[in-house]
Amino acid sequence: MNNTTLQFASSKIIMETSARIWGNCKLKDLGEWASGSGFPREYQGLDGSKYLFCKVSDMNTIGNEVYIHSTENTIDDEVARKINAKIHPKGTVIFPKIGGAIATNKRRILVKDTAIDNNCSGIIPKENVKSKWLYQLLNSIDFSTYQRSGPVPSLSQKTLEEIDVPCVRMEVQEQISLFLDWLNQKSPEASWDNSPNLPSELTQQKHLIRKIEQLIVRIEQIKKLRADAVEEVDELLKSELSRIFQKEDLETSSLGKVCKTSSGGTPSRSRSDFYKGEIPWLKSGELNDRLITNSEEHITKEALQNSNAKIFPKGTLLIALYGASVGKTGILGIDSSTNQAICAVFPRSDVLNTSYLHWFLKYKRNGFIDQSFGGAQPNISQRLLKKTKIPIPNLPIQRDIVGYLDCLQEKIDELKKLQGKTEKQIEELIPSLLDRAFKGEL
């Protein structure tokens, strides 16, 4: 289940209801602002000193999911004085205030005297405000909606100070914190009968949160079923390809005996004028296992004459020899040149149907990758292609196989298109559910 979604929704529902019941105050009324300082490189890397020095990255450390128990850096009193760092007490709740980290809505509680860097800010709770309550309260606020726009997003202390928040007694803070803690740590099997009590004024909200949890569980189950269906569709095509191309009663031949191969080239990149022509020039990353009707780049006739690039005619079968797209294929729907990472394959028309060979190469892709070399940049060679054995039924049967697989692919494409629409609808269910919950419409 999506615990993060449930945590945010639960905190938001309880805090907004608490504000209606017990009244509002401003965020600045709950404590003193904790500011960060710069941290010059020459003072970093010190371990075992008196104070922790917390950066935003330390919030991601295992064990620091709620409380800051450890940091990569520490400082002593002398360093704190030199960098003008303020030491914030145990119980301070901190959060990112600059950059993309704002949108992560991380909140952390300090468990010992700690300095924070200037990408962080925080609140030191007053005596009548519990740290865990403040932490839960801040978890109910999406700070990204308050950030200032610009090249680097940032939060203004003045803006945050004026946010309306519930103002409740300490015993109510304690009850709410215990309940939200239980909910955040709750296993799917845990019974609601054992949940901590909330104030009687929040009984209805507790029932609502339980209902939201049940609905989120159902939505997650639907998402899993959909993911399983997508996987089953992909497996269907794989199994059909295996059934067709693994028949033992078919005559086989190496591709080198029934095909010719060639590859392209890359004109000099130092000659920018080479890439201002009208001749399509394909890179291996543009192969998509389908008909190719355009290219990202075009070259000149002079570029062709001064490189190994050559024009292959419309209808040519292509396969990527190396790189991230190794094994990917395509059939030219236009006359085009290619780079050297692409191999053009020309089957003998009296023996091998091009589309049949295309399906066979797609079937063999994983096998080619398994036999590739080169580590981070896997490579397959024309020699490997030529040694590959292909079953060769007569041409009418090849055409029948192509017709069947094309039809199957068309149906799979239609199904995936439908699955894409349902995926969007499923992804919209939880936001819609929460929106209705926040409006009191559930």
Image (cartoon, rainbow, N blue to C red):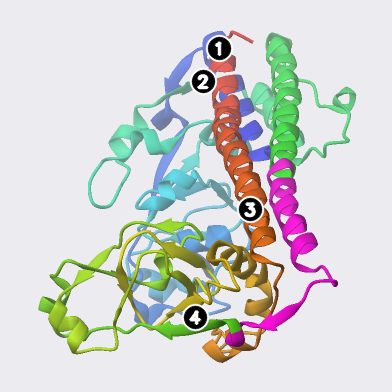
User: Do callouts 1 and 2 mark residues in contact (Cβ within 8 Å)?
Assistant: yes
Q: Residues within 10 Å of mark 3 (few under 14, many from 20)?
A: some
Image quadrant occupied by the C terminus:
top right
Which residue, given by chain and number where applicable, does mark 2 sit on?
A: 166
The numbered dot on residue 10 is none
Q: Nearer the viewer, mark 3 or mark 4?
A: 4
In this rendered view, identify the residue nearer to me: 50 or 405.
405
> Where does the magenta region start and end?
229-257
Q: Residue at 10% x, 77% y: name it.
A: 273
Which residue, given by chain and number where applicable, does mark 3 sit on?
A: 65
Q: Residue at 14% x, 70% y: name it.
A: 277
Q: Reading the chain from its start, which is encountered first: label 1 or label 4?
A: 1
Q: CA distance from mark 1 to mark 2?
A: 7 Å
- Residue type of the residue flagged with mark 1: Trp
Q: CA distance from mark 3 to mark 1?
A: 30 Å
Q: Residues within 10 Å of mark 4 (few under 14, many from 20)?
A: many
Q: Is residue 420 magenta?
A: no
Q: Residue at 27% x, 52% y: name it.
A: 152
- Asked if residue 279 can be seen in this view, the reply is yes
User: Do callouts 1 and 4 mark residues in contact (Cβ within 8 Å)?
Assistant: no
Q: Residues within 10 Å of mark 2 (few under 14, many from 20)?
A: many
Against 304, residue 407 (above or below) is above
- Residue type of the residue flagged with mark 4: Tyr
Q: Reading the chain from its start, which is encountered first: label 1 or label 2?
A: 1
In this rendered view, identify the residue nearer to me: 70 or 283.
283
